[in-house]
Image (cartoon, rainbow, N blue to C red):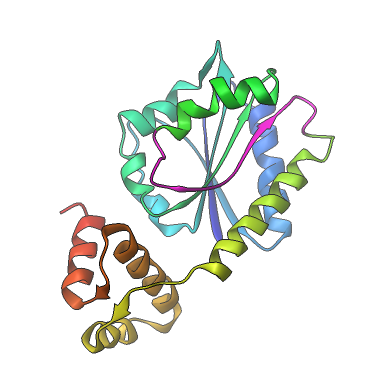
Amino acid sequence: MKAVILYDSKSSGGFTEALIDALGLSLAEEGVYVEKAKCRANADYRFVQEFDLVILGAPVYYFVVASQLLGSLIHGNLRQHLKRKKIALFLTCGSSEAMAAVLYLPQLKMHLIRNKILVEKIFASSALTDGAIDDFTEDLLYEYQKTIKTRTSSSQWTDEALDRLHSAPTFIQGKFKIMAEEYAEEWGYKEITTEMLDEARAKLEGR
């Protein structure tokens, strides 16, 4: 599995970045390939399509989630390239989890209503030492594996569409199949045809 941590933080080398490094290490120890990228509202986020899992995280400043991450969702093209992606969310703040769940997490979730959010977490300042990061990793990998194991598709593949699937390099056939079936499910197709595959490809390429 490939995961990317997209984050925002006004300070360099502070708590949020230390937490992200610890989270990346925790995931890597479980066999996950991990990259991280600091958000910029006007950045090009096409690269997230290469990842199976996207983890979004940021601190809260004066009751608002850090602006570059929010800006990437509202004004940038991040939301466009998160389509059909599995998501995990975390925030760092001094508020209680109950308050943060009501006031802060919805600032992100309102822009992700079509995504599967696997887990969400509020990290307190003690997270680097209290085991919260490993718990988050464990919950995240459990939920991810559960979606893989339980996912079934009601769509049928035509012979022509299957021929196109099998003509792709072997190492990407599994991902190709999942993306096609997720697209069919999202747009209400009962049958996966070459025409539907062309349509899905055009939308992914922004045409």
Relative image position of residue 187 (x, y in whole percent): 26, 59
Q: Is residue 63 above or below residue 168?
A: above
Q: Residue sitting at 68 percent across and 63 percent down? A: 31
Q: Magenta span has 55?
A: no
Residue 14 visible: no
Magenta residues (range): 111-127
Q: Is residue 161 above or below residue 72?
A: below
For residue 178, what is the image quadrant?
bottom left
Residue that lies at the very extreme toward the top in this rendered image = 62
Quadrant position of the N terminus in the picture: bottom right
Quadrant position of the C terminus in the picture: bottom left
For this view, does 203 lie left or right of residue 173?
left
For this view, does 165 lie left or right of residue 118?
left
Q: Residue sitting at 25 percent across and 67 percent down? A: 189
Residue 63 visible: yes
For residue 36, what is the image quadrant?
top right
Relative image position of residue 88 (x, y in whole percent): 56, 44
Relative image position of residue 97 (x, y in whole percent): 68, 26
Q: Magenta span has 118?
A: yes
Q: 84 or 69: which is nearer to us?
A: 84
Q: Residue sitting at 64 percent across and 32 percent down? A: 17
Q: Is residue 59 above or below residue 24?
A: above
